Protein backbone atom coordinates (compact mmCIF):
# COMPACT_ATOMS: atom_id res chain seq x y z
CA UNK A 1 0.00 0.00 0.00
CA UNK A 2 2.83 2.39 0.83
CA UNK A 3 4.35 1.71 -2.58
CA UNK A 4 1.12 2.74 -4.34
CA UNK A 5 0.87 5.93 -2.26
CA UNK A 6 4.43 6.85 -3.28
CA UNK A 7 3.63 5.99 -6.90
CA UNK A 8 0.49 8.12 -6.80
CA UNK A 9 2.39 11.09 -5.37
CA UNK A 10 4.97 10.96 -8.17
CA UNK A 11 2.33 10.66 -10.89
CA UNK A 12 0.21 13.39 -9.31
CA UNK A 13 3.15 15.81 -9.35
CA UNK A 14 3.77 15.05 -13.03
CA UNK A 15 0.11 15.58 -13.95
CA UNK A 16 -0.18 18.80 -11.97
CA UNK A 17 3.03 20.05 -13.57
CA UNK A 18 1.78 19.79 -17.13
CA UNK A 19 2.04 23.02 -19.14
CA UNK A 20 -0.98 24.72 -20.69
CA UNK A 21 0.64 26.88 -23.35
CA UNK A 22 1.38 29.74 -20.98
CA UNK A 23 3.21 27.74 -18.33
CA UNK A 24 6.10 25.46 -19.19
CA UNK A 25 5.76 21.78 -18.28
CA UNK A 26 7.52 20.94 -15.03
CA UNK A 27 10.23 18.29 -15.19
CA UNK A 28 10.58 17.47 -11.49
CA UNK A 29 13.94 16.99 -9.85
CA UNK A 30 14.68 14.04 -7.59
CA UNK A 31 14.15 16.31 -4.58
CA UNK A 32 10.83 17.60 -5.99
CA UNK A 33 9.26 14.13 -5.80
CA UNK A 34 10.19 13.64 -2.16
CA UNK A 35 9.28 17.21 -1.30
CA UNK A 36 5.84 16.79 -2.82
CA UNK A 37 4.99 13.78 -0.64
CA UNK A 38 6.16 15.50 2.55
CA UNK A 39 5.07 19.02 1.66
CA UNK A 40 2.06 19.02 3.98
CA UNK A 41 0.44 22.44 4.18
CA UNK A 42 1.51 25.99 4.91
CA UNK A 43 0.45 27.57 8.18
CA UNK A 44 -3.35 27.77 8.32
CA UNK A 45 -4.69 31.19 9.27
CA UNK A 46 -8.49 31.13 9.81
CA UNK A 47 -10.14 33.95 7.90
CA UNK A 48 -13.66 34.53 6.55
CA UNK A 49 -14.11 32.70 3.26
CA UNK A 50 -10.88 30.72 3.68
CA UNK A 51 -11.29 26.98 4.04
CA UNK A 52 -8.76 24.54 5.40
CA UNK A 53 -7.23 22.36 2.67
CA UNK A 54 -6.60 19.02 4.38
CA UNK A 55 -3.24 17.35 3.48
CA UNK A 56 -4.77 13.96 2.69
CA UNK A 57 -1.81 12.42 0.85
CA UNK A 58 0.64 13.45 3.59
CA UNK A 59 -1.64 12.11 6.32
CA UNK A 60 -2.32 8.82 4.54
CA UNK A 61 1.36 8.09 3.93
CA UNK A 62 2.40 8.78 7.53
CA UNK A 63 -0.58 6.90 8.99
CA UNK A 64 0.41 3.85 6.92
CA UNK A 65 3.98 4.15 8.23
CA UNK A 66 2.67 4.19 11.79
CA UNK A 67 0.47 1.19 11.09
CA UNK A 68 3.38 -0.71 9.53
CA UNK A 69 5.34 -0.57 12.80
CA UNK A 70 2.32 -1.14 15.06
CA UNK A 71 1.27 -4.81 15.35
CA UNK A 72 4.41 -6.97 15.27
CA UNK A 73 6.43 -6.13 18.42
CA UNK A 74 3.81 -6.80 21.09
CA UNK A 75 2.01 -9.44 19.04
CA UNK A 76 5.20 -11.49 19.08
CA UNK A 77 4.82 -11.78 22.86
CA UNK A 78 1.88 -14.12 22.28
CA UNK A 79 4.06 -16.51 20.29
CA UNK A 80 7.72 -17.32 19.87
CA UNK A 81 8.78 -13.97 21.29
CA UNK A 82 7.67 -14.99 24.77
CA UNK A 83 9.81 -18.13 24.63
CA UNK A 84 12.82 -16.11 23.48
CA UNK A 85 12.26 -13.62 26.27
CA UNK A 86 11.98 -16.30 28.94
CA UNK A 87 15.05 -18.10 27.60
CA UNK A 88 17.30 -15.05 27.34
CA UNK A 89 16.06 -13.45 30.59
CA UNK A 90 16.83 -10.03 29.12
CA UNK A 91 13.82 -7.77 28.87
CA UNK A 92 15.95 -4.77 27.94
CA UNK A 93 17.63 -6.66 25.10
CA UNK A 94 14.30 -7.96 23.78
CA UNK A 95 12.73 -4.50 23.79
CA UNK A 96 15.78 -2.90 22.19
CA UNK A 97 15.57 -5.46 19.39
CA UNK A 98 12.00 -4.29 18.70
CA UNK A 99 13.19 -0.68 18.63
CA UNK A 100 15.79 -1.67 16.05
CA UNK A 101 13.03 -3.44 14.09
CA UNK A 102 10.99 -0.20 14.04
CA UNK A 103 14.02 1.77 12.82
CA UNK A 104 14.68 -0.79 10.07
CA UNK A 105 11.06 -0.66 8.91
CA UNK A 106 11.14 3.13 8.52
CA UNK A 107 14.54 2.94 6.82
CA UNK A 108 13.17 0.43 4.28
CA UNK A 109 10.18 2.70 3.58
CA UNK A 110 12.50 5.59 2.78
CA UNK A 111 14.74 3.37 0.65
CA UNK A 112 11.63 2.51 -1.35
CA UNK A 113 10.64 6.19 -1.57
CA UNK A 114 14.09 7.26 -2.76
CA UNK A 115 14.18 4.37 -5.22
CA UNK A 116 10.83 5.27 -6.78
CA UNK A 117 11.77 8.96 -6.91
CA UNK A 118 15.07 8.08 -8.60
CA UNK A 119 13.27 5.90 -11.15
CA UNK A 120 10.79 8.67 -12.01
CA UNK A 121 13.65 11.15 -12.30
CA UNK A 122 15.41 8.91 -14.80
CA UNK A 123 12.26 8.16 -16.79
CA UNK A 124 11.19 11.79 -17.06
CA UNK A 125 14.62 13.26 -17.75
CA UNK A 126 14.78 15.12 -14.46
CA UNK A 127 17.95 16.10 -12.65
CA UNK A 128 19.41 14.66 -9.47
CA UNK A 129 19.84 17.93 -7.62
CA UNK A 130 19.03 18.99 -4.07
CA UNK A 131 16.92 21.89 -5.36
CA UNK A 132 13.16 22.18 -4.95
CA UNK A 133 11.63 23.84 -8.03
CA UNK A 134 9.49 26.90 -7.42
CA UNK A 135 6.78 25.31 -9.55
CA UNK A 136 6.77 22.14 -7.42
CA UNK A 137 6.43 24.28 -4.28
CA UNK A 138 3.55 26.20 -5.86
CA UNK A 139 1.75 22.97 -6.76
CA UNK A 140 2.24 21.54 -3.28
CA UNK A 141 1.09 24.74 -1.59
CA UNK A 142 -1.89 25.09 -3.95
CA UNK A 143 -0.89 28.74 -4.29
CA UNK A 144 0.43 30.18 -7.54
CA UNK A 145 1.88 33.20 -5.69
CA UNK A 146 3.59 31.16 -2.99
CA UNK A 147 7.11 31.47 -4.36
CA UNK A 148 8.79 32.43 -7.60
CA UNK A 149 12.28 31.17 -6.74
CA UNK A 150 13.83 27.72 -6.69
CA UNK A 151 15.07 26.55 -3.30
CA UNK A 152 18.63 25.23 -3.61
CA UNK A 153 20.45 23.15 -0.98
CA UNK A 154 17.14 21.69 0.21
CA UNK A 155 18.53 18.15 0.07
CA UNK A 156 19.79 18.37 3.64
CA UNK A 157 16.18 18.64 4.80
CA UNK A 158 15.50 15.15 3.43
CA UNK A 159 17.14 13.80 6.59
CA UNK A 160 14.43 15.22 8.83
CA UNK A 161 11.35 13.11 7.89
CA UNK A 162 12.97 9.70 8.56
CA UNK A 163 14.47 10.92 11.84
CA UNK A 164 11.19 12.37 13.12
CA UNK A 165 9.14 9.44 11.86
CA UNK A 166 11.45 7.00 13.66
CA UNK A 167 11.13 9.05 16.85
CA UNK A 168 7.33 9.15 16.70
CA UNK A 169 7.11 5.44 15.81
CA UNK A 170 9.28 4.60 18.83
CA UNK A 171 6.97 6.63 21.04
CA UNK A 172 4.01 4.79 19.53
CA UNK A 173 5.69 1.52 20.55
CA UNK A 174 6.33 2.84 24.06
CA UNK A 175 2.75 4.04 24.50
CA UNK A 176 1.45 0.66 23.33
CA UNK A 177 2.91 -0.78 26.56
CA UNK A 178 0.62 1.47 28.57
CA UNK A 179 -2.37 1.46 26.24
CA UNK A 180 -3.79 -0.92 23.71
CA UNK A 181 -1.83 -0.82 20.42
CA UNK A 182 -4.86 0.48 18.54
CA UNK A 183 -5.17 3.39 21.00
CA UNK A 184 -1.48 4.16 20.54
CA UNK A 185 -1.99 4.20 16.77
CA UNK A 186 -5.02 6.50 17.06
CA UNK A 187 -2.99 8.91 19.19
CA UNK A 188 -0.30 8.97 16.48
CA UNK A 189 -2.88 9.81 13.82
CA UNK A 190 -4.50 12.41 16.08
CA UNK A 191 -1.12 14.08 16.48
CA UNK A 192 -0.82 14.29 12.68
CA UNK A 193 -4.26 15.88 12.43
CA UNK A 194 -3.38 18.40 15.13
CA UNK A 195 -0.17 19.28 13.28
CA UNK A 196 -2.10 19.81 10.05
CA UNK A 197 -4.37 22.39 11.72
CA UNK A 198 -1.87 24.09 14.02
CA UNK A 199 1.68 25.22 13.34
CA UNK A 200 3.26 24.72 16.74
CA UNK A 201 6.79 23.63 17.67
CA UNK A 202 5.37 21.41 20.43
CA UNK A 203 3.43 19.29 17.91
CA UNK A 204 6.07 17.00 16.34
CA UNK A 205 4.04 16.40 13.18
CA UNK A 206 4.92 19.94 12.10
CA UNK A 207 8.50 18.77 11.59
CA UNK A 208 7.27 16.29 8.99
CA UNK A 209 5.95 19.09 6.76
CA UNK A 210 8.46 20.66 4.40
CA UNK A 211 6.19 23.66 3.84
CA UNK A 212 6.58 24.45 7.55
CA UNK A 213 10.39 24.55 7.25
CA UNK A 214 12.44 27.77 7.28
CA UNK A 215 12.98 27.99 3.50
CA UNK A 216 9.21 28.24 2.96
CA UNK A 217 7.78 29.63 6.21
CA UNK A 218 9.07 32.65 8.11
CA UNK A 219 9.86 31.46 11.62
CA UNK A 220 9.47 27.88 10.43
CA UNK A 221 11.24 24.76 11.58
CA UNK A 222 15.00 25.11 11.81
CA UNK A 223 16.88 22.05 10.54
CA UNK A 224 19.56 21.64 13.26
CA UNK A 225 17.03 22.18 16.07
CA UNK A 226 14.55 19.84 14.38
CA UNK A 227 17.11 17.04 14.04
CA UNK A 228 18.17 17.45 17.67
CA UNK A 229 14.53 17.30 18.74
CA UNK A 230 13.98 14.12 16.70
CA UNK A 231 17.06 12.47 18.23
CA UNK A 232 15.98 13.56 21.72
CA UNK A 233 12.46 12.16 21.20
CA UNK A 234 13.85 8.88 19.88
CA UNK A 235 16.27 8.46 22.78
CA UNK A 236 13.64 9.31 25.40
CA UNK A 237 11.20 6.87 23.79
CA UNK A 238 13.74 4.04 23.95
CA UNK A 239 14.66 4.78 27.58
CA UNK A 240 11.02 5.08 28.66
CA UNK A 241 10.12 1.90 26.77
CA UNK A 242 12.92 -0.13 28.35
CA UNK A 243 11.95 1.04 31.84
CA UNK A 244 8.27 0.26 31.22
CA UNK A 245 8.94 -3.14 29.67
CA UNK A 246 11.00 -4.25 32.66
CA UNK A 247 7.72 -4.12 34.62
CA UNK A 248 5.42 -5.19 31.80
CA UNK A 249 3.24 -8.23 32.45
CA UNK A 250 3.87 -10.63 29.56
CA UNK A 251 1.27 -13.14 30.74
CA UNK A 252 -2.02 -13.19 28.79
CA UNK A 253 -4.71 -10.90 30.20
CA UNK A 254 -7.99 -12.52 31.11
Image (cartoon, grey):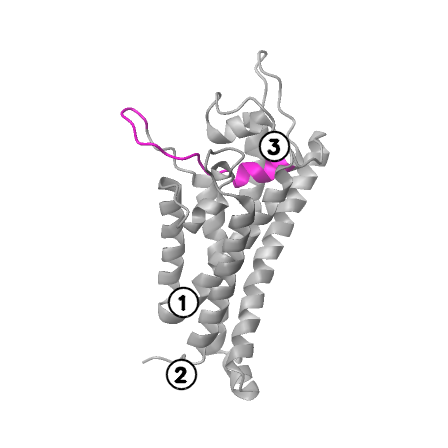
Of pointers 1 and 2, the one earlier in the residue sequence: 1
Decide which of 192, 66 is in the foreground and name it: 192
Identity of the residue drawn at 59% across and 18% down:
19
Helix, strand or loop under label 3: loop
Q: Position of residue 137 (x, y in %)?
A: 54, 29
- Viewer-nearest of discs 3 and 2: 3
What residue does disc 2 label?
Answer: 251
- Identify the residue under disc 1: 176
Q: What is the C-alpha distance between the residues marked 1 and 3?
A: 37 Å
* Residue tagged 3: 132
The answer to which of marks 3 and 2 sits earlier in the sequence is: 3
Kind of element beneath mark 1: helix
The answer to whether any part of residue 20 appears in the image is yes
Tell me if residue 66 comes above or below residue 250 in the rendering.
above
For mark 2, does the 10 Å Cα neighbourhood hold few (<14), some (14 to 19), or many (20 or more) residues? few
Task: Please provide the residue range marked out in magenta.
Answer: 31-50
Amino acid sequence: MLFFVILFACVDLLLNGRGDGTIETLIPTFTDYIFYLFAGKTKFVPMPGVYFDFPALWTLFLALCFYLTLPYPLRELTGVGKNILLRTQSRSGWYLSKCIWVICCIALVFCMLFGVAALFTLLTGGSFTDTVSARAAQIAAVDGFFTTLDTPDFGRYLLLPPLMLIALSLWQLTLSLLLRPVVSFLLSVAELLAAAFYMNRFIPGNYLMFLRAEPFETGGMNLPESCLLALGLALSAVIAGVLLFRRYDILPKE
